[in-house]
Image (spheres, rainbow, N blue to C red):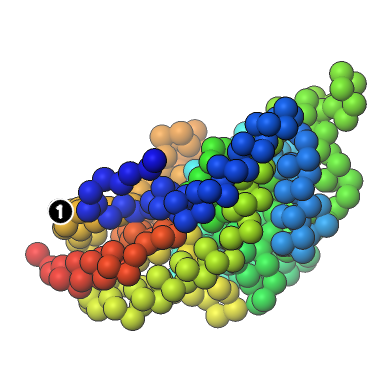
């Protein structure tokens, strides 16, 4: 039986979400174990069908992780050495690795006041080498897909959407993942529709492309031991697919619950040092994270909350261009001042399904009682 540490309010609490429907998960795991079939079977097929249906996409292909969804997308769109891909400068490192694993070069664009790529700054970064825009819908909120799709059309660019943090979020009423050539999803446990291990998928309306993903994920073979291309092993397994079907059946309620927690934060938090997340007109958020900006005293604020047994996280403390892993790109501090400033001022408040009203009130009171100096 899952037991929590006493009192501590964690930034995320997966055990709490699990405990809301524990019986259903246990039943599903036993079903799959009893079936005697563990890789690429009925559960994966059913999940792919249901996820595509949920999004309104024609095809879904289950994969082993969100990173796989990204790098295999660029690989199968033939984007690699000598090509440039545009991505926000405050992205998660996996977004950038998905690009560079194929030998392509990430071209960073500053975020806007909504913490997503500033679509008005994309055009100036387009060169004759630009092949694609990676639209990362950070923290649960949509990028401006109208501007991004318009640029893509005018410059003949591919659009890959990274929806790892925005399962079920929308742009102008249309669900994310259905705008670009490919929508990439991670089902890492902390994500909206999280698995109980690693998992991911892509969605697309392009039948030929979907077929390529299906073959690529299984060593390039459609028929056992007949390999059409050099692929990878990126299979979604039956247990995770089965568990994801249970999660999907509750996804809308999970998203609604996090929206209610966000509303409570908006209503209750009153502290001039704390800037609320801004939501772009036309976007909605499923609140993967509730990210406030604390332009001064962020670290003292974080420590203050920790002393009150409230855990917070920073998404993300080091922008990819300053990461040791990307020293090879030759960027330096000052190249993307907005993304660098955001890294110093963002803070993610506790946000999880099953968060009690009492816990929400404790967070609000603690945030409101923090003073400068
Ligand atoms: C989690 C995440 C990924 C990577 O997903 P994994 O399943 O961990 O490989 C990629 N992009 C974003 C924005 C993410 O949040």
Structural crowding at the residue carrying mark 1, measured as other residues with C-alpha within 10 Å and reported as few (<14), some (14–19) or many (≥20): few
Work out which quarter of the rendered image holds the N terminus and state it.
Answer: top left
Judge: label 1 CB < 8 Å from ligand 1.
no
- Say which of 256 and 92 sits in front: 256
Q: Which residue is mark 1?
A: 307
* Residue 105, placed above or below residue 360: above
Say how many tags the image has. 1
**Residue 102 x, y percent position in the rendering:** 67, 34
**Residue 137 x, y percent position in the rendering:** 57, 60
Work out which quarter of the rendered image holds the C terminus and state it.
Answer: bottom left
In the visual, does 284 lie left or right of 159?
left
Residue occupying image coordinates x 62% and y 64%: 168
- Say which of 364 and 18 sits in front: 18
Residue occupying image coordinates x 62% and y 36%: 30
Residue occupying image coordinates x 48% and y 36%: 326
In the visual, does 35 lie left or right of 265?
right
Name the secondary structure under disc 1: helix
**Residue 94 x, y percent position in the rendering:** 54, 42
- Say which of 37 and 195 sits in front: 37
- Say which of 177 and 194 sits in front: 194
Q: Residue furthest left?
A: 373
Residue occupying image coordinates x 47% and y 56%: 20
Q: Can residue 21 be spotted in the picture? A: yes
Dividing the picture into quadrants, the one containing residue 199 is: top right
**Residue 32 x, y percent position in the rendering:** 67, 36
Q: Can residue 141 be spotted in the picture? A: no
* Residue 313, placed above or below residue 102: below
In the visual, does 99 lie left or right of 16?
right
């Amino acid at each position: 039986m899952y037991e929590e540490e006493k009192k501590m309010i964690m930034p995320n609490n997966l055990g709490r979400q699990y405990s809301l429907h524990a019986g259903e998960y246990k039943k599903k795991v036993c079903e799959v174990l009893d079936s005697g079939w563990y890789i690429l079977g009925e559960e994966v097929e059913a999940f792919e069908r249901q996820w595509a249906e949920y999004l309104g996409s024609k095809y879904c292909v289950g994969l082993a992780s969100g990173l796989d969804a990204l790098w295999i997308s660029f690989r199968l769109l033939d984007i690699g050495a000598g090509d440039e891909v545009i991505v926000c400068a405050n992205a998660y490192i996996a977004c950038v690795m998905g690009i560079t694993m194929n030998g392509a070069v990430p071209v960073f664009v500053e975020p806007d006041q909504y913490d997503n790529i500033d679509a008005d700054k994309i055009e100036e970064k387009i060169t004759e080498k630009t092949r694609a825009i990676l639209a990362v819908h950070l923290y649960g909120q949509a990028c401006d897909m109208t501007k991004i799709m318009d640029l893509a059309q005018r410059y003949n660019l591919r659009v890959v959407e990274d929806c790892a943090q925005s399962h079920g979020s929308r742009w102008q009423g249309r669900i994310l993942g259905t705008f670009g050539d490919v929508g990439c999803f991670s089902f890492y446990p902390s994500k909206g529709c999280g698995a109980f291990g690693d998992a991911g998928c892509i969605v697309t309306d392009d039948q030929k492309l979907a077929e390529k993903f299906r073959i690529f994920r299984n060593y390039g073979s459609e028929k056992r031991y007949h390999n059409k291309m050099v692929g990878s092993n990126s299979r979604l397994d039956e247990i995770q697919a089965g568990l994801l079907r249970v999660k999907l059946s509750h996804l809308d309620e999970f998203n609604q619950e996090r929206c209610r927690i966000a509303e409570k934060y908006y209503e209750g938090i009153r502290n001039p040092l704390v800037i609320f997340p801004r939501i772009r007109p036309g976007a909605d958020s499923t609140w993967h994270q509730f990210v406030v900006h604390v332009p001064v005293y962020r670290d003292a604020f974080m420590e203050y909350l920790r002393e009150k047994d409230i855990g917070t996280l920073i998404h993300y403390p080091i922008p990819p261009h300053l990461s040791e892993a990307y020293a090879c790109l030759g960027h330096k501090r000052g190249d993307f001042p907005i993304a660098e400033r955001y890294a110093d001022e963002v803070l993610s408040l506790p946000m999880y399904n099953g968060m009690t009203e009492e816990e929400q009130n404790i967070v609000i009171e603690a945030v409101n009682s923090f003073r400068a100096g």
